[in-house]
Image (cartoon, rainbow, N blue to C red):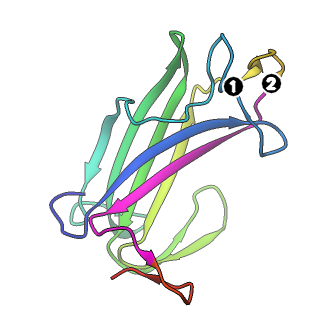
Amino acid sequence: FGEDLNAVSVNVKSVYQVAEDQETRVGKSGSGTRYSFPSLSQQPYEIEYFSNEDEDTVYGLNATQAKFSTTLQSNGQDIGTLVVDTFVFGEEGTIQSPLSSETYDVLPGDVKFNVELKNWTFCEGCGENNNETAAYVDVAIVIKGRSPKPEKEDDDEIDDG
């Protein structure tokens, strides 16, 4: 976010619909509508909201927030809208999930994502043989800093500079 030397970039790498076995990716091939998206690098996004730590609080803590969305389409059909809310916390504290009593401790610089699928169409009878059905969605999010990738040392620890 911003011109900060510690800024990071956040990208949605892929969205896959997954079968009941929680392993098999479905809807990624066949002549019909595609329900899985192995690359979103060319996907247009809309920035819905952006704030900085001085302007916003999230779960009662100072945080930078960016909310972006994109509608995924295949063969002219909307599969659904992917909404990603990204929070970078500016202070230490404890946050609680709005959907449960589960709590999380955060430190300054910690990042949290909320992923929402709106008007989502699950694959039913799709794929090469029209026999695939989705039960879950896997969303891969990549977060990168400006520093080069950490290198693994002999003792299996990562040296991040």
- When the figure is inspected, residue 82 is found, relative to residue 72, above or below; the finding is below
Q: Quadrant of the C terminus?
A: bottom left
Looking at this view, is 110 or 131 the one in front? 131
Q: Quadrant of the N terminus?
A: bottom left
How far apart marks 1 and 2 lie (CA) works out to 7 Å
Residue 121 pos. (x, y %): 65, 23
Q: In the figure, is residue 51 to the left or right of 116?
A: left
The image shows a total of numbered marks equal to: 2
Q: Quadrant of residue 15?
A: top right
Indicate the secondary structure of the residue bearing disc 2: strand
**Residue 43 disc label:** none
Within 10 Å of disc 1 (Cα), the crowding (few <14, some 14-19, many 20+) is many
Residue found at x 30% / y 38%: 47
Residue 123 pos. (x, y %): 72, 23
**Residue 132 disc label:** 2
Q: Of the residues shown, which amino acid type is indicated by label 2?
A: Glu
**Segment colored magenta:** 133-151
Indicate the secondary structure of the residue bearing disc 1: loop
Does the stretch in magenta take in 137? yes
User: Which of marks 2 and 1 precedes in the sequence?
Assistant: 1
Contact between marks 1 and 2 (CB within 8 A): the answer is yes
Looking at this view, is 143 or 51 the one in front? 143
Residue found at x 58% / y 62%: 97
Residue found at x 26% / y 65%: 146
- When the figure is inspected, residue 115 is found, relative to residue 148, above or below; the finding is above
Q: In the figure, is residue 5 to the left or right of 120?
A: left
Residue found at x 79% / y 36%: 19
List the residue tagged with mark 1: 27
Q: In the figure, is residue 1 to the left or right of 12?
A: left
